[in-house]
Structure formats: C-alpha cells, structure tokens
Image (tube, grey):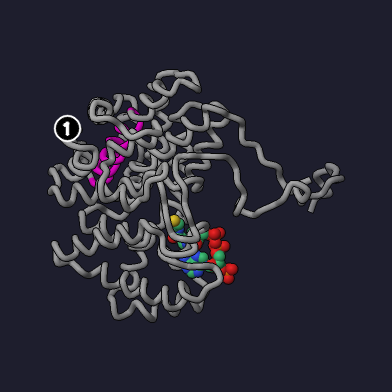
C-alpha cells in the first residue's frame, strides 16, 4: 500500500499541504514571508508589524499596527494559574519542558473560537504571543534564582522581553538586533515544529494545545536546540586556534557539526548572513571576540571541507550564529531555544489559522514492516 502511495523517510520532498505564510527557496538560499524577502524584512520591519502580517496575510495600516501593538502589550501578564505551573517546576528542568507545560496551562484560559473565525483566532494568537514571551522570561529568572520582572507596557515586544529577562531596559541597538533576530525566526514553511502544530490543529484541537505540542517538537537538538549545541561546541573547542583540527576530527569520526546542514537549503541559509552581520556589529561594539573567532574558523573550515564539495550540501543554517549573538546580549545558552519559541509562535499560529480555513485532518499511511500472521504464545514458552 505504502509503496503504491510513495514512501519518503522523514517525509523528505513530500508536499503535505499548501501555504502562503512563507516559502524556503532552498536552491537559491532565499526565504520569503508572504512574498517579502527576509533581508527586506530585517531591514525595514518590526516584530509587531510582522506579527500582524503573518497572522492576517496583509500589511497593517497605521491604525491596525497601533491596535496589534497595543494588544501585544495589554496581554503580557500571565494568568496566576500559569505562574503557579511555572513556579512548581523543578529548577533543574530544561526551560523547554517548563514552557511546554506552561503553554498547555495557558489553554485553560483560551477563549473558545470557531475554526473559521479569523478575528477570534488572531486575538487568541496575539494573546498567546504576548504571554509566551512573559512565560519564557519568568522560567529563565526562576532558574537563575531571580524574582520575576513584571512586563511593562511602554516598551516594544523585543525591548520588553529583554527587560523581563534582565531587569534592565536594553540599549536601542541591542533591542533592534533582538527584534530582527525574532523576525528571522518567525516562520520557515513546514519545519518540524510547524508541521507538528499543523498536525495537532488539524484534529481541531485548540490553538494553544497545538502550540504546546509545537514547543515539544522545537525542543529537540535537530531542530530548535541546535544553537545551544553550537555554543557548547565552541566552548568545547576552547580557542580559535584549535577549531580547524576540531572540525577535521569531527568529520573524520562522522560527527555532525551543529549549525550546519539543512533539509531544504542547498546553499547558505539567508538568515545566517543577517545574523552574522549583526553579530559582527556587536563584536565590534563590545570588543568581545572569543566565541565569534572560534565559530568563524569552524565556519570557514566547514565550508572548505564540506559546503563546496559535499553531495549533501552542508552549509551554515540559522542556528550557527544566533547563539553567539545572544551570548553577547548576556542571554544564557539554555534560554536560546525558548527564545526561538518567542518568535516561532507567530508562525505556528499563522499556519493554524490559515489551515483552519480549509481543514482536513492529517493522517498519512504507514509502510508496515512487521509480521502479519503472529499469534499469542503461552507466557511460559516465551524466550
Ligand atoms: C538539519 C539536519 C537535521 C538535516 O537532516 P537531514 O536532511 O535528515 O540530513 P541527514 O542528517 O540525513 O544528512 C545527510 C548526510 O549529511 C551529513 N550531515 C548532515 N548534517 C551534517 C552536519 N551538520 N555536519 C556534518 N555532516 C552532516 C550526514 O552525516 C549525512 O551523511 P551520510 O549520508 O554519510 O550519513 C542535519 O543536517 C543536522 O543534524 N544538522 C545539525 C543540527 C542542526 O544544525 N540543526 C538545525 C537545523 S535548522
């Protein structure tokens, strides 16, 4: 049956549905959100504007932008029940595990909305986007033994998030770089967490339940966890002069170098270029070159060894530089993947709202490889 239908391990190359939210043009290294290139978005837009654009499918007018900006501020506080869920988690739990639980708990307060009610679903998505940021900051501070910082309503989404994380309002430069980093991570067509969100939502499960599942998918090192692993790698290498040998050894032992490779890109991920530019700007401002220099040598060695030659097209992806950028913003490594979720929640929600306009449950076929005529033997005779 499966052979007749076609079988592709990991669903590689399978077209699972249609979307107009974003497109990865892997051959040429281009990413577009509803037609607009990620480079233009990074240069001209803001998190608030992109939230409206991705969720609604049109660029906001000034009053529409003012409204979504006000809503993102108004919804920032967490329900007491969700605060209690976060505060009940062991301090040693990985923040993604706590975030997934917090998202599941946010579903208790989600207003029930008809599947095709775009206004109602967008309202829920904006609320979820605002609250997810607050949850991530609270989880981080609790882990670090710090009291939560209440959100402020006079700051942008990016500024307020960094303020809630650190207790201090960031400089305009850092806030803008973080705003851009969030926009770069907002959507990426049918990546694993978005596909997970779509699968869950295709059962007509609620938006927040679907996002909670997507957080689980994002927690894995082959997906959102990779930028955390890139910095672990940089720390393990220890110094720029050791990087070249380290890469040679990794490749000789068939180890994967984190932050490289992609299912769709056949060349450099365009987000990696934008992130590298911002990182270089921050390295120049802070004078702290340590992690950057090690990564730069890993990067150049990998491109020489694999990028230019490998049949598998192993080029840098979004995760290669983002961790080093966040580190210079004084963000702890373990918080990187939750920050990915702060941005990607917009993409997850946009896909769900789009899909619900013409929903069909996802239910692929399996290639069954087990026995077909087995029987139950007496327990005493089983080996
Ligand atoms: C992204 C990723 C999961 C894509 O996986 P995929 O499309 O299933 O590709 P595969 O893992 O099957 O890789 C194909 C080949 O390239 C090699 N390869 C892939 N990524 C590699 C990497 N980062 N470093 C070294 N070799 C790599 C694999 O070992 C494999 O070689 P083989 O056929 O000799 O076994 C994979 O490239 C990876 O694990 N990268 C590191 C993690 C990462 O950065 N993730 C973030 C993604 S945005």
Image quarter hosting the C terminus: bottom right
Q: Is residue 134 above or below residue 226?
A: above
* Identity of the residue drawn at 29% across and 28% down: 78
Q: Start and end of the magenta stretch?
A: 127-144
Q: Is residue 186 above or below residue 28?
A: above
Q: Which residue is mark 1?
A: 152
Query: Is residue 319 or residue 27 the one in the foreground?
Result: 27
Query: Is residue 270 or residue 109 the one in the foreground?
Result: 270
Image quarter hosting the N terminus: top right
- Where on the picture, by quarter, is residue 238? bottom left
- Residue 183 visible (yes or no): yes
- Residue 323 visible (yes or no): no
* Identity of the residue drawn at 48% across and 46% down: 189
Q: Is residue 141 magenta?
A: yes
Secondary-structure class at tag 1: loop
Q: Residues within 10 Å of mark 1 (few under 14, many from 20)?
A: some
Query: Is residue 39 or residue 198 the one in the foreground?
Result: 39
Query: Is residue 298 or residue 180 the one in the foreground?
Result: 180
* Identity of the residue drawn at 34% across and 77% down: 243
């Amino acid at each position: 049956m499966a052979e007749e239908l076609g079988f592709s391990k990991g669903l590689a190359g399978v077209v699972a549905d249609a979307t107009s939210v974003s497109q990865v043009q892997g051959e040429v290294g281009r990413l577009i959100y509803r037609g607009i290139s990620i480079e233009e978005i990074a240069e001209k837009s803001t998190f608030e504007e992109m939230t409206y654009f991705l969720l609604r499918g049109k660029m906001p007018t000034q009053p529409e932008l003012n409204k979504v900006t006000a809503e993102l501020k108004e919804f920032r506080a967490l329900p007491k029940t969700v605060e209690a869920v976060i505060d009940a988690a062991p301090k040693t739990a990985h923040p993604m595990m706590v975030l997934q639980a917090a998202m599941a708990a946010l579903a208790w307060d989600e207003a029930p909305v008809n599947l095709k009610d775009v206004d109602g679903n967008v309202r829920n998505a904006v609320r979820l986007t605002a609250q997810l940021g607050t949850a991530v900051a609270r989880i981080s501070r609790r882990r670090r033994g710090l009291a939560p910082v209440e959100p402020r309503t006079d700051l942008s989404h990016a500024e307020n998030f960094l303020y809630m994380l650190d207790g201090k309002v960031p400089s305009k430069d850092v806030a803008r770089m973080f705003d851009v980093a969030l926009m770069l991570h907002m959507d990426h067509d049918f990546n694993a967490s978005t596909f997970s969100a779509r699968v869950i939502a295709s059962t007509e499960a609620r938006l927040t339940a679907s996002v909670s599942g997507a957080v689980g998918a994002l927690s894995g090192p082959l997906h959102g966890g990779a930028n955390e692993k890139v910095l672990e790698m940089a720390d393990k290498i220890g110094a720029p002069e050791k990087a070249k040998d380290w890469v040679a050894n990794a490749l000789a032992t068939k180890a994967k170098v984190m932050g490289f490779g992609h299912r769709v890109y056949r060349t450099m991920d365009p987000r990696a270029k934008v992130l590298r530019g911002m990182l270089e700007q921050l390295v120049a401002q802070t004078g702290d070159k340590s992690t950057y220099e090690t990564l730069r040598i890993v990067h150049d060695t990998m491109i020489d060894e694999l990028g230019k030659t490998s049949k598998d097209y192993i080029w840098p992806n979004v995760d290669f530089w983002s961790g080093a950028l966040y580190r210079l913003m004084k963000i702890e490594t373990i918080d990187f993947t939750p920050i990915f979720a702060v941005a990607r929640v917009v993409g997850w929600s946009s896909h769900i709202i789009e899909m619900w306009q013409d929903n069909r449950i996802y239910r692929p076929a399996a290639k069954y490889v087990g026995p077909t005529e087995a029987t139950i033997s007496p327990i005493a005779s089983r080996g």
